[in-house]
Amino acid sequence: MKSEGTTPDAVTFVCSLKACNAMRDLNNGFDLHSEIAKKGYVGKNAFVDSSVVAMYCKCGALEEAKNVLESLPSRDTFTWTALATGYVKHGHGEKALDCLVQMQKEGITYSAVSFVCGLKACVNVGSLEKALGLHAEIARSGLLEKSIHINSTLVHVYSRCGSLRIAQEVFDTYPSRNEILWNALISGYSEQGHNERALCAYKNMQLDGYSPGSVTYICSLKACRLLGSSQTGFEIHGAIIKRGLEDDVVVGTALVDMYTKNNLLADAKKILDMMPYRNVVTWNALIAGYIEQDHGEEPITHYEQMYHDDVSPDAVTFICCAKACSGILATEKAHFFHIEASKRGLDLDRILGGALVDMYARFGWFSAAQKVFDSLSNPDDVTWNSLIGGYLDSGHVHKALEHFERMQTEGIFQDSFSFLHGLKAYSSIGLWEKGQELHIETVKRGLLETDSFLCSAFVDAYARCSLLIDAQVVLDTCQSQSVVAWNALLSGFVEHEHYVKVLDCYKCMRCEGIAVDAVTFICVLKACGMTKALMEGQEIHTCIVQRGLDDDIQLGTTLVDMYGKLSCLEEEEETFVKLPVRNIVSWNVLLTNFLKNGHFEQAVPCFEKMESEYISWDETTAVCALKAWANLGSADGVRKAHAEILKKGLDNDGLVGNSLIDVYIKVGFLSEAKYMFHKIFMADKASWNAMIAGHVEQEQAEEALCLYDQMQTLCICPDAITYIFILKACGCKPTVVRGREMHAEIVKKGFPEADVYIDTALIDMYIDCGLIAELQHVFYQLPLRNLATWNALLTGYVEYGFAEEVLSLFNLMQAKGVALDSISVTSALKACSVLQESYAAREIHIFIVKAGLDRESVLGNALVDMYHKCDSVLEARRTFDGLLVQDMVSWSISIANYAGHCDGDAALDCFEVMENGVFTGSAVTFASSLKACGSSGALTKGHKLHSLLVKIGLECEPYIGNAVLDMYSKCGLHATMQEVFNRVGTPDLIAWNSLIAGYAQLGESHRAFYAFNKLSEEDTLPDIVTFSSVLNACSNGGCVDEGSLYFLAIKNDFDCIPTLELFTCMVDLLARAGNLITAMIFIELMPFQPSVLPWHVLLGACRKWGDVQLGQHAFENAILFDESAAAAYVCLANIYADIQIAYSA
């Protein structure tokens, strides 16, 4: 035009400016602007002015557009609207609204286009309030009823601002609707996730008489895609075909997208193949669909088809291809796509660059990922997160932290995923202080309250670090409390054994309407098992069944485990049988609980069942099999399990090897245990401990100590378990010097401060060695004393007869608030029995009741025994009758105590009541009953019991045989007594003592002497009881000379020190024979302070021989020990009475 000499006018310039707009040709636009200015059109033609402003806006030169506007002498609606429109299109909503404000200040009237522009700016800035203000302004201007374009924009704006109610009101109040208005409503509902309402609007549009167009179909198909409604999608597809719109590339692309998202990939591909024209968007929709459905290499195949279709890929295509390569680890293809993107200059695209970084990070190619990352001019937060996440997943924590902290330093926006990565990185290397800083930052930004994933991550992190209160606080402050966050807290409570808290949290979840899942139930079931909450566990089980979750194998296995821990054998097996699939984990759970509950017989058949179900053993199964057979005492079973272990190649596992050592020791096969020990290559500490423990348990202390020395030689450092068993070995021997050496070594290594089990073992060792002073020193030097150490000291005091110290220590434990248990209380009751402290005993009884310990049968039986020993027979009987369970031990205690207190009738009555019940008697009850028969002279009952014992084969038991001997001796049947004795295969000392005592009691002194001589010939060393019986035989037979010889032999021939009891026997022997002066001298020459008993013996003899003077002397000495002893007064009175009678005669 210029070459022909034709002068352009205003219209020419406007058209040329529009051409620059279309081509985004800023250079030509700038030239046109210069020429327009030369021609004098600027500021004189509003149409040209607004076109210049619009050109600069369209080409992105917003600052130039603003300068042009400000240079104009007069600005009108068109120029301001052109600038505002430019701001809106480039996302500067606030500046667009500022333009409208300036228009108002300059008195310029808004046009319909101005209002539309302002409304779109409200969407940009997300301001519903400003949109409402413009709406009111539009209403005042009178344009609301006239412009459908304004109304459709209002519907769109309110929808985007989240106010669908107002959008619907605008739609409903506009009288003349058209397709544009309906499309605005449908797209609004769809964009806000109300897809069902969008499809409802689509149907209402047709009912209202309007035919949907391409835009309508596209919006409706989007709703179908998001809703997953393939059926409605089919119907819309049919309508599109009827309207002949299937060839429309945008509609076709929407159809492809809808079908792919509904996993109807074959239909999507069919649509694409039928389309006459397919653009890159269509192909991208198909490829993206295949990627979302994880269809391996098919997305790459479709890329190749697209290439052959002469469709040039764009950044989105390569983003999809990068994702596809990541999913199938197609490294070669990934490199190819990267090169192709680079050829097209697309690799610098920020989003594609991020996808490439993510792809290379997933491959572990961090040099390539870093290179792409560094080439990006301004990587977004998604790209940063991809690189950081990749480093984290590959264990490069420090690299991840380096980039995370770079984000912070460079002011890169960090979203929830960034903080998740940072939290994971800091937690993994123990920098929890940094994690807490992240927590503070997320709270400041308001992320934690609304982001359930971030909330869950922080709850989980705090829980793993044992900061459970902080975890609870995080959860409480989170507005959207997801089940994942609750599960993280529950898992933390389970991990740190706060099981009651788990149950409390579960109740809170139910109250707050949180939809619990399988993970929740697993945590709660574990808590029920550990807290013995059977009722709650059964309720959870019912809930699981109702929700159809009982097919979950992990959940089912946890149910089995819970019932096992609750000792509900029937429910455990029933649940196990109902499992849809029984894997090695579920079998091991069942086996482990069988063993823990002592159901060894039930465990054994499981191994064959596993074989029948083709479940191969693992290390846990092998250990369970060994333990089951060992606890049943079956050496053959252990060998059978060992053979299976060898067959399955599990013998190289350390835990299995140690278990083999342990079980062979348990079944008494130390040689096999040693063989296994030496077979283990480089035996670890656990193996050495197993061997040492085995030798200690088999009372081979010397061998255990030798093994310990070998450990030291091989530089294997002993641990707490080693020292515990070595200390037991020192106590078994007992090896005092070695025990002290061990103690010194333990102190040197610092174990007493770290392990209370070692403290208890030390105390036990000193008890076994009889070193009470050192025992007390160790105890009071302990920095931390737990119940086990207190009880160990109590037990030591009881063992060595320090009854008063027991009660003092028991009172000290109460004063210090130590939680006493049955062992503590039993020790105190034994002390009361020794001291005859019935008052203290009643105080302890009250404590037992208050502490709720009276339900324990051990304590109930201990109370019965204590009251008997304190001669409180009525209290004993009352306590016995009040026992919840009267077991064999209860009956044995009562019968033994009645018999021991010479109340034979009561003992036999008790035995008869027991027999009439559910018990048939034990060795203890039979022995006690026989003793009762002897003391009460119940020969018939005794003979009946003897016959029963012969019948059931218990007569040959040493304990029973001795009781039978004692019964017949007390009943005076020496012939029967001798027969019973002769039937004893190898009589022990107790049997010999019973025989000698029987003959002594019957006055058969020569037979007693003969029995004693036979005992000596068989190399059985006599004890104090033996010597006492022999001296009694001498006394009953008047054999003073023999008695004197036997007394001298006690020290000279048998190297025993005569006790007070033996001295008293000699006094009795001499006094009965009339040697009263010798008897008195014997008392006065005793090597220790005599008791009241010898003087009573002498006093009784003085009456027999009528010696008043010596009787007076014996009386005076007797009352020195006990002034209130009635027997002494009575005996002296009888002496005087006898003399008086003699004088009277």
Image (cartoon, rainbow, N blue to C red):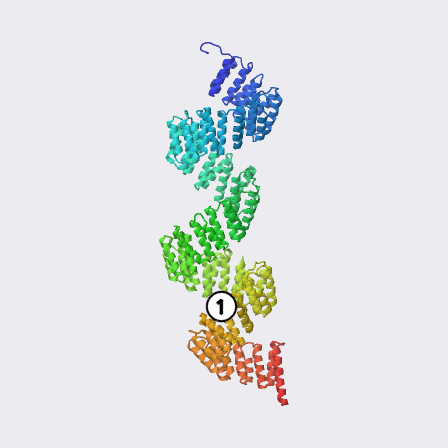
Identify residue for label 1: 922
What's the residue type where badge 1 is placed?
Answer: Ser
Furthest residue to the bottom? 1145
Foreground pick, 870 / 1042: 870
x, y (%) of residue 894? 55, 68
Q: Is residue 309 found left or right of 72 in the rendered image?
A: left
For residue 963, above or below residue 521: below
Binning the other alpha carbons within 10 Å of mark 1 as few (below 14), some (14 to 19) or many (20 upward) gives some
Number of numbered markers: 1
Foreground pick, 614 / 869: 614
Observer able to see residue 78: yes
For residue 903, above or below residue 859: below
x, y (%) of residue 390? 44, 38
Furthest residue to the left? 647
Observer able to see residue 776: no
Q: Is residue 689 found left or right of 116 in the rendered image?
A: left
Going 44% across and 42% down the picture, which residue do you hit?
Answer: 395
Picture quadrant where residue 322 is located: top left
Foreground pick, 1059 / 134: 134
Q: Secondary structure at mark 1?
A: loop
Furthest residue to the top? 5
x, y (%) of residue 84? 55, 23
Quadrant of the drawing holding the C terminus? bottom right
x, y (%) of residue 332? 37, 35
